[in-house]
Amino acid sequence: VKKGKLQVFKGGSVNSAGALVGGTELSNLWPGDCFGERALLHKEPRTATVVAQENCELLTISICELQEIMGGDLGVALERNLLLLALKRSPRYSQFSAAQQFQLVRNMEIRDFPAGAKVEEEFQFAIIINGQLSGEAASEKVVLERGQCYEDGYVITDEKLRPLSRKPSEAVEVLDQQKVLQNPRAGADKGVRMGVLTKKGLAIAMSELGLGDGGDHE
C-alpha cells in the first residue's frame, strides 16, 4: 500500500453494484502494509476481500519479479517481511527504529505446532503465520488466524483511528488488557505455524543493540 486506507474482510458477498455486503472486518491496511503473500507462499487462493475505503495507490509485483530480486529463498524472505510488518503494528515494538526491528526479527524463531498441540511456552511476542491458534480470553473462545498477534500473553486488537490523535503511519493496534490468552492450542485442522520472540531471543537482541545486558541466556 503506497497511499490510502483499505480494510480486509472475511466472508460476505458482492452485489450488482460491485460493493461488498456483509462479512467480518479482520484488519486495516495502511501505507507500508502489503497483502497477497499467502498466495505466493502456499499457492492458495485468497480467503479474504480487500476493500478500498478511500482513493488508494498500490504497488504491485509479480512472483517472477520477486524471484528475480530475492532468488530461490522467496518463502523465507516473505515470512521475514511478515514478521517485520507485525512488529510495526505492535504497541511496544512499533516504537523501535527499523534497524532495531530488523534485529528483533533476526532473533525470532519459526515454530510449528501439530494439530491440537498445547502451546505452553510464554512468548514476548507471537504472530500467526499459517493455520490457527485457539484459546480463551475474558471467558470467551478466541481464534487467532494468519497475521494476528499476541504480546506478553495479551491479544492485540485493531483500534479505530481517532481523528487528530493518531496518524496512519503510527501503530493502530493495541493490547486488549481484558483479553489474556489462556490455554492456547494449535488449530484442530492443520495446526499452526508461528513467528515467536522468546524471552531469550529478546534478551539477545537487546544486548546486541546495546539496550541491555542481555539477561540470562540459559
Image (cartoon, grey):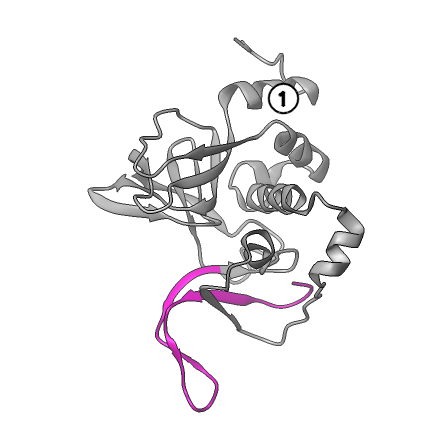
Does residue 145 show up?
A: yes
Residue 24 position, x and y percent, is: 36, 65
Q: Position of residue 166 (x, y in %)?
A: 55, 55
Left or right relative to 128: residue 140: left
Q: Nearer the viewer, residue 12 or 110?
A: 110
Residue 142 in picture, x, y percent from top left: 29, 46
* Residue in the image at 41% along x and 49% along y: 145
Which residue, given by chain and number where applicable, does mark 1 sit on? 206
Above or below — where is 71 with respect to 27?
above
Task: Specify whether residue 21 is painted magenta.
Answer: yes
Residue 52 on the magenta span: no
**Residue flagged by tag 1: what amino acid is it?**
Met
Q: Residue at x 63, y 45 (%)?
A: 75
Mark 1 crowd level (few <14, some 14–19, many ≥20, 10 Å Cα): some
- The mark tally for this picture is 1
| Secondary element at image label 1 | helix
Residue 164 percent location from the top left of the image: 55, 60
Which residue: 19% across, 42% down?
Answer: 139
Segment tinted magenta in the rendering: 1-27
98 up-or-down from 122: above or below: below
Q: Nearer the viewer, residue 50 or 32?
A: 50
Q: Residue furthest bottom?
A: 16
